[in-house]
Image: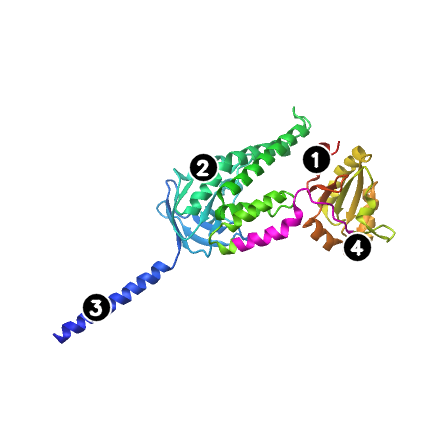
Amino acid sequence: MKNNKVNRFTIFILGLVISSLQACKDSKKEFEITAKIPGMYNGLIVELVNDEDGNNTLMAIDTVENESFVLQGSVQEPVAAKLVITNRALIPEDASYEKQFETTTSLWVENVKMQYKAAHLDSIPLSYVYLSSPLYKEANVTVDGGKGEEMFTAFRNQLRPYEIDYSEKSMRYYSWDEKSEVTKEDLYNDLHNSHQTLLAAYKSFIKQNGGSVSLFIMSKFLDAEYSFSKEDLATWKKVVGAVEGDSIRVAEIKKKLNEMAPYTTGTPFQDIDVLTGKGEKLKLSNFMEEEKFLFVDVWASWCMPCLAAVPSVKQLHSKYNSKVKFVSLSIDKDEKQWRKALEKENMEWRQLLRDSLTVDQLEKAYHLMSVPTFILVDKSGTIRHVGHDPESLDIIFGKIIK
């Protein structure tokens, strides 16, 4: 009788231990992405990489076997990721482009079970398609599992048509040549209108849906100064305030919203210190003229894209110098190299050099992150354009300067 009691007690304790271990296992949240896709052959590598951290950090990896793979891991917060299928392990490192195979699918990863589905390996969009876009085949893949992925799929389905239209118009514009039947200006107008429609669609999705996926989209805008208005910022702050959980992303977006507040459309011109060729210290505002726009080309003698942009700026100067005050502002530290470049390029408008405070002021006032940067200020002192593409300047001038 005593042994029976001991045995029952032992079984009871073992049951508690097993239950505790199972509870610990259940409390450890993980994601699991499974797939069985016809045509996937053994040896293909499947990688899940972080699409938000800027480093493509590897989150999980598996090798295809019997047309299947399983990706497992955990995330601290929901994250946008890319699932990549590649034959990299099956071909030599120096294999030709034709022998390389790689597909990429965007998805939203949370600590839930997910299923990756496609009719066949050949139906999955390739990472790169010459003179085409992976967007055309994006809808061939579905990912089931998790409320975040459901919202992310809705986002992709809603925005894909606009992205395809913008992609097509971009290819037409950048492949234009003088033999084309349409003018480059017409193509740029089409591209500009498509881009504005796409941006409006992104903003509409953010406003209507909210949640972590909307914060992810919002972060893309906040990386591009002067692509949003004060009204946009006010709306986005409300969206951020309504998001539950996802504390890391919420904190990052709140910080970005505050940092980018000075760089909205319609922001007034901000003055900075500059030096003339004679070493005279002045303000950039000293070169503003009544009834004229101000165009500032921020460049450097060591910057090859800056030098490549000089012919475009020369054409603008020839065409608009009666309506626009042109100024080039170099951030060169080496004055001799600056003067050598000036002599070679023969730019016939006012040339200025950085002061000790100039670069810091440019970063603060215009969020300067790279050169060349082109700034156009209207007669009222309002910033009308900040960009980096010299090819589009003539069309932008034509739209703004009448």
Rendered-image quadrant of the N terminus: bottom left
Which callout, 1 or 2, points at the residue further toward the start of the chain?
2
Task: Give the label, 1 or 2, closer to the camera.
Answer: 1
* Residue designated by label 4: 355
Which region shows up in magenta?
250-272
Determine the secondary structure under disc 4.
loop
Say which residue appears at 18% left-offset and 73% top-offset: 6
Identity, as a three-letter code, of the amino acid under mark 2: Ala
Residue 266 in sight from this viewpoint: yes
Q: Position of residue 366 (x, y in %)?
A: 70, 48
Q: How much space separates mark 2 and mark 3, taking CA atoms?
A: 53 Å
Which residue was labeled with disc 1?
A: 396
Q: Of the residues shown, which amino acid type is indicated by label 1?
A: Ile
Identify the secondary structure beneath mark 3: helix
Q: Is 164 a magenta residue?
A: no
Task: Report x, y in % for residue 387.
Answer: 68, 42
Tell me the distance, in whole angstroms, between the alpha carbons under discs 1 and 2: 35 Å
Residue 262 painted magenta: yes
Q: Identify the mark at residue 11; answer none if there is no mark.
A: 3
